[in-house]
Image: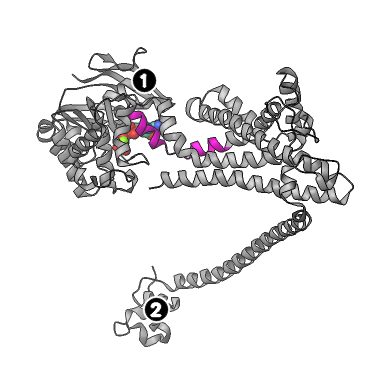
Amino acid sequence: MVIAAKNLTLAYGKNIIVKNLSLAVGPTTVTALIGPSGCGKSTLLRTFNRMNDFVPSFRMVSGNIHYRDLDVYSNQVDPVFVRRRIGMVFQKPNPFPSSIHKNITWGPRINGFQGDLDHLVESSLKRAALWDEVKDKLNSSGLALSGGQQQRLCIARAIAMDPDVILMDEPCSALDPASTARIEDLITELKDRFSMLIVTHNMQQASRISQNTAFMLNGELVEYGTTSQIFNAPAQRLTEDYIMGRFG
Amino acid sequence: MTKDPTNNDPTNNDPANNDPTSNDPTNIYANGQAAREEGFTSSREIHLEASFLDNLARRRVQAKVFALAIQLATCMALLALGILVWRIGSQGLPYLNWNFITSFPSRKAERAGILSALVGSATIIFMTTIFAVILGVSTAVYLEEIASKNKFAKFLELNIANLSGVPSLVYGMLGLAVFVRIFDFGRSLLAASCTLALMVLPIIIIASREALRTVPPSTRLAAAALGATPWQTTYHHTLPAAMPGVLTGIILAISRALGEAAPLIIVGGVTYIAFLPTRLTDSFTTLPIQIFNWAGRPQEEFQSLAAAAIIVLVGLVLVTNGIAIFIRTKLENKNRW
Ligand SMILES: Nc1ncnc2c1ncn2[C@@H]1O[C@H](COP(=O)(O)OP(=O)(O)OP(=O)(O)O)[C@@H](O)[C@H]1O
Ligand SMILES: [Mg+2]
């Protein structure tokens, strides 16, 4: 298992958000995280690479998370190392206000990357299906791209770090159908190299791109299984209701 | 919704038939009429629309009066400034020549110059800026990026806000006690620079914190998610993005420090210095001190010398601020897309 959460209970201040949740994600799979708004998907996702450390009121009440052999929340583990191995793509595209080239190379550079930066830029952008559109303007600002291009730049930026896992929190929610389709293709292509965890509100998207699906409700994991099982033969009534759009 | 009775007549649905103004698309009544013909608007709503229009007219008048008042106030300020510039200019310009700038002060007005004061001001402002920027920006980064929530930070925050309101004379006393006596810098350039740096520190800290706060959190999160340490995030992204705002603070600080005479007189600025400083522990004078001294003399010539020195001082402020604004504009252009 690449990521394994065990009996996780998470809270902001006094509000318990995620309750006694256990979830394990294997290598080179795409796992979709679905559930109604406010059920704690983003909270769970941000906990995997310790991005919740930036929320002052966040507390891990109980449980633990392992990334491979590493206890992510133990005192000996540097959160910077965890984030360097577990990348993240945010809901809203957030390129740095600097050149496309620097957007991609900054992360590897500060982490001591020794190889050829130009080559890294080209290969990352190609894998993010953005190279053809930007190859002539690598020195122009990342903010001058369209929303869909910006999101692909953010994915390229995450790929360039050669992470082990990529967490994506509704990566397509700000995009048009064409850009969404491109990013879905991209995720499918990348799954041989990385483990990916994707939060999505789009049931079709979940069924198209993921191998496994986890359904959360009110901070609890209701059902977790292969995507075809969850979508075709859900074991739980709640799962079926949610997938059929009867609530949430 | 009460329907207008005229609307029930299917033959009478052309607004042009009963409203001669309706051909004009800009006529709001005509549009109201058209809406009524379509049965969307009751006569009561039409009435409301009319009273909105009355209100708009009144608000327009208010806006005009307000704009006029603001313009008047601006003109008054400009007038005062104009008179000042004209008076200083007409009095000082005849005395402003190369000799004035390259001579040391003298008891004879026709031989007196500002060389030592100009060099003193330039040296002090240079060192003050360096000290204040290093300390001020570090403090702001500490408060905003590292310690944003602990008690110590809250305590510091409160004190910084209070410090910015302390009169400059008090900083002079502080400088005398701490830098001149305890640190034993003497009545020197170094003591003066440290005192002024302390005085403008709150300005730089407050402006830098504001600037850091305007950097979107998503930038910090993006950097952190790439495995950046907090310091790398700050140094490479947050601080550069905040730099234009930080420079605004520096500009304000320099302007304030350049014009201060009182704290430096307390720290020990002297008015008669007939040599150029070679070490930081040399005694000093500055333009404001020199101006203060000359302006207090009864002779007409010295008053004019003071005016000429004021012109030089204003020029110095403009030049230093010009440099800072130039850097700021460059950075702003770089940060924009
Ligand atoms: N920084 C925060 N501080 C306090 N409470 C928070 C914070 N972020 C989220 N919450 C609360 O935690 C709960 C779960 O939020 P979360 O963002 O994880 O939901 P989500 O499943 O991602 O929803 P959505 O699908 O709308 O993104 C919500 O009730 C929210 O109000
Ligand atoms: Mg969310």
Name the magenta segment's main secondary structure.
helix
Counting from the top left corner in percent of width and height, residue A246 is at: 21, 41
Residue A89 in the figure: left or right of residue B329: left
Answer with the quarter of the image where residue A52 lies.
top left
Counting from the top left corner in percent of width and height, residue B192 is at: 71, 30
Residue B202 visible from this viewpoint: yes
Q: Quadrant of ligand 2?
A: top left
Answer with the quarter of the image where residue B162 lies.
top right
Task: Return the mark for residue A60.
Answer: 1
Q: Secondary structure at mark 1?
A: strand
| Badge 1 amino acid | Met
Vertical order, A66 against A244 (above or below): above
| Badge 2 amino acid | Pro
Asked whether residue B243 is drawn in magenta, I would say no
Q: CA distance from mark 1 to mark 2?
A: 64 Å
Task: Return the mark for residue B25.
Answer: 2
| Residue at 63% from the left image edge and 32% from the top image edge | B128
Q: In the orientation shown, which residue stands out farthest toward the right?
A: B298
Q: What is the span of residues highlighted in magenta in the rendered image?
A: B207-227
Vertical order, B308 against B133 (above or below): below
Asked whether residue B222 is drawn in magenta, I would say yes
Q: In the orientation shown, which residue stands out farthest toward the top?
A: A76
Mark 1: C-beta under 8 Å from nearest atom of ligand 1: no
Task: Return the mark for residue A225.
Answer: none
- Chain of the residue under the numbered disc 1 shown in the image: A
Q: Residues within 10 Å of mark 1 (few under 14, many from 20)?
A: some
Answer with the quarter of the image where residue A166 lies.
top left
Counting from the top left corner in percent of width and height, residue B98 is at: 71, 48
Q: Quadrant of the C terminus of chain A?
A: top left
